[in-house]
Image (cartoon, rainbow, N blue to C red):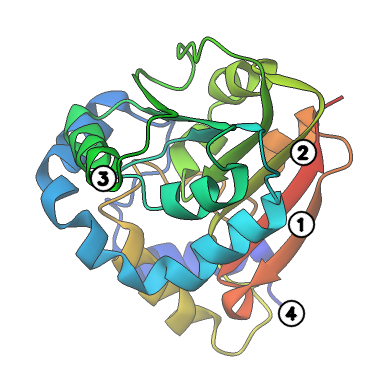
Amino acid sequence: MPNGTQQKRGWAGLVGTGMPVGAPSRRRALDSYRTVAAEYDRRTGFGEPFRRQAVESLAPAPGEVVLDAGCGTGLNFERLEDRVGSRGRLVGIDQSPEMLAQARERVERHGWTNVTLVEAPAEHADPGVRADAALLCATHDILRSPPALENILDRVKEGGRVVAAGPKWAPWWRFDAPSLDLATWQINQDYVTTFEGFERPWSHLADLVPDLEVTEICFGAGYLAAGTTG
């Protein structure tokens, strides 16, 4: 019976040898999101149920401060705002100026006055607050960068909640794993700069959040990881 490594070698052959598997690349990310920012919301509408599930798992409470790391165009903002209310605060962090421009338009359109946007790589971002919770939704590049994760978690209060969610390779033993993985690659190739760690995207986060609990979703092609800071 093939093991996970063997299955992924076979999968790599399906998508070609050019599939990026090294460290995340800030330059490639900035180039990619500059291209897709204007159409990002429309192109990722299929992810709404999973974004909703991630925010529900984070369970922000009225008056809390929440970090949305890798916030992109702010697709999670409305649900987070509904939870924290006007007494709470939301800080969106993203390194792409084009994506943050879309997020800023969203904030202005809704008239939210308690949202701060920080344009910076996650490993250097300073939200200026200690948060009660942090959300990392569809942020594979951040999850594969220990310095980025450490910086984000350092900005969360002790005992604060952390939720990460996103795509992953399907388990090798599923009969439909090749077709699921092909769809996953096609959907995500414009939004990640590396597929390194795509079997277990949360592995670095688990090193920093000992009580992290991971649930597979979307037929094993996605995950939801939740825990608390130490």
- Residue of label 3: 106
Are the residues tagged 1 and 2 within 8 Å (C-beta)?
Answer: yes
Give 148 or 17, whichever is nearer the viewer: 148
Residue 64 drawn at (x, y percent):
67, 33
Q: Secondary structure at mark 4?
A: loop
| Horizontal side, residue 210 vs residue 187: left or right | right
Q: Residue at x 18, y 34 (%)?
A: 101
Q: CA distance from mark 3 to mark 1?
A: 31 Å
Residue 155 found in image quarter:
top right
Residue 146 in the image, given as x and y percentages of width and height = 60, 24
Q: Of the two numbered discs 4 and 1 on the same chain, state the one appearing first in sequence.
A: 4
Q: Is residue 5 visible?
A: no
In the picture of the structure, the residue carrying the numbered disc 1 is 214
The one of 100 and 222 positioned closer to us in this rendering? 100
Few, some or many C-alpha atoms within 10 Å of disc 3 (few <14, some 14-19, many ≥20)?
some
Which residue sits at x=70%, y=36%?
205
Most foreground residue, 22 or 169: 169
Q: Is residue 128 left or right of residue 26?
A: right
**Between discs 2 and 3, the one toward the N terminus:** 3
Residue in the foreground of this view, choosing between 151 and 117: 117
Element class at badge 3: helix
Crowd tier of the residue under label 4, counting other residues whose Cα lies within 10 Å: few below 14, some 14–19, many 20 or above = few
Circle 1 packing at 10 Å, graded few (<14), some (14-19), many (20+), is some
Q: Earlier in the sequence, mark 4 or mark 2?
A: 4
> Which mark is on residue 1?
4
* Figure quadrant of the C terminus: top right
Q: Is residue 105 visible?
A: yes
Closer to the N terminus: mark 1 or mark 2?
Answer: 2
At horizontal 74% and vertical 64% (from top left) the residue drawn is 215
